[in-house]
Image (spheres, rainbow, N blue to C red):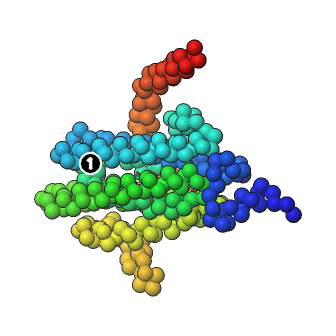
Amino acid sequence: PASTQEDLFEAVIAAEQRIEPRDWMPDAYRATLIRQIAQHAHSEIIGMQPEGNWLTRAPSLRRKAILLAKAQDEAGHGLYLYAAAETLGVDRAELTEKLISGRQKYSSIFNYPTLTFADVGVIGWLVDGAAICNQVPLCRCSYGPYARAMVRICKEESFHQRQGYELLMTLMRGTEAQRRMVQDAVDRWWWPSLMMFGPSDADSPNTARSMAWRIKRHTNDELRQRFVDMTVPQAEHLGVTLPDPELRWNEERGGWDFGEPDWSELTRVIRGQGPCNAQRVERRRAAHEDGAWVREAAVAYAAKRSAEQHT
Ligand code: 3HC
């Protein structure tokens, strides 16, 4: 029988090829990609706030320059991802409105406070480390624009992770107080970093379909396990302990067994009851409103230019 658009779509996915913006795609494929790419973009933009908290208080010009470069990278990742989302027929103004009104999500991890400068290092090491585990497979996502955006973003993320780990190594070679500061930050960020990968597979409504459509290439639990296996040796090398009494090497599996994250905390934070949710969204709303004049000026200038070209 003549192949339907659906058959063609399925054949492209099965052949590990890319779906491009002008290709036919099921409405649900488009909708779940808009959902995930928009949330990913929102996360990058909101993620600038926790680190921005230390921009004016970095302990040296070098640390300030690195942190400034990282925050600028995150902004760029956000804009890149909004551009990828727009290839699916939405507009970034609409997505920003949904973020500010709480109708779209961003990563739970950015709702925790950055209490000391060691948090900047731990965010680079653990949060960007987790992001790398999650984002490298997305380079093989079936939707072209998203996969291609990920290639460039992953290159910059590895710099983010390395600068964080180097910052922590420096602190660990410092005073006892500095070493305690690092351990305190690790204790606060370890479990929220594991929650970045999402709920367990059994409680993940989107994973099965995202795997079938090759948007996701591994499940939440698989990526979480990969992150733990990668990070435990790094913690040992750094000289910090991870706050999980159930962490132990599993010989026959060749990986680390670890405790259960507190899923009720993840649910609370996703629902908006995390430590910093209100402040993060309020800051985003204020920045959007304060920037309205720039958008209006750009639109007025574009109108003036096009009027000149048609006279
Ligand atoms: N924070 C907020 N919401 C979360 C979440 C988290 N940590 N984990 C899951 N959720 C939400 C999901 O969005 C979904 O809600 P929705 O249907 O309304 O969107 C619900 O909880 C159930 O979760 P699922 O596992 O079914 O949802 P997904 O299949 O979408 O998996 C995900 C969640 C793994 C986060 C996936 O969406 C994903 O890979 N997103 C892209 C990557 C991303 O956003 N990474 C994190 C932040 S980016 C970053 O860290 C930047 C770096 O520079 C620091």
Callout 1: SS: helix
Looking at the image, residue 138 lies above or below residue 254: above
Seen as rendered, the residue at the extreme bottom is 252
Seen as rendered, the residue at the extreme right is 1
Instruction: Report if the beta carbon of the residue with label 1 is closer than 8 angstroms to ligand 1.
Output: no
Q: Which image quarter holds the C terminus?
A: top right
Q: Is 271 left or right of 211, judged from the image as shown? A: left
Q: Nearer the viewer, residue 138 or 117?
A: 138
Q: Is 74 left or right of 211, judged from the image as shown? A: left
Where in the figure is residue 239, as x and y percent of width and height? 23, 68
- Residue at image location 24% in from the left, 59% down from the top: 166
Q: Is residue 39 visible?
A: no
Q: Nearer the viewer, residue 194 or 129?
A: 129
Tell me how many marks there are: 1
Looking at the image, residue 226 lies above or below residue 287: below
Which amino acid does the dot numbered 1 rest on?
A: Ile
Where in the figure is residue 75, as x and y percent of width and height? 41, 42
Instruction: Estimate how packed mark 1 is, as few (under 14), some (14 to 19) or many (20 or more) residues with alpha carbons within 10 Å.
Output: some
Where in the figure is residue 126, as x and y percent of width and height? 35, 59
- Residue at image location 12% in from the left, 59% down from the top: 175
- Residue at image location 38% in from the left, 73% down from the top: 247
Q: Is residue 291 visible?
A: yes
Where in the figure is residue 255, as x and y percent of width and height? 42, 77
Seen as rendered, the residue at the extreme top is 311
Residue on which the image places disc 1: 66
Seen as rendered, the residue at the extreme left is 175
Q: Which image quarter holds the N terminus?
A: bottom right
Q: Nearer the viewer, residue 150 or 196?
A: 150
- Residue at image location 62% in from the left, 44% down from the top: 88
Q: Nearer the viewer, residue 160 or 114?
A: 160
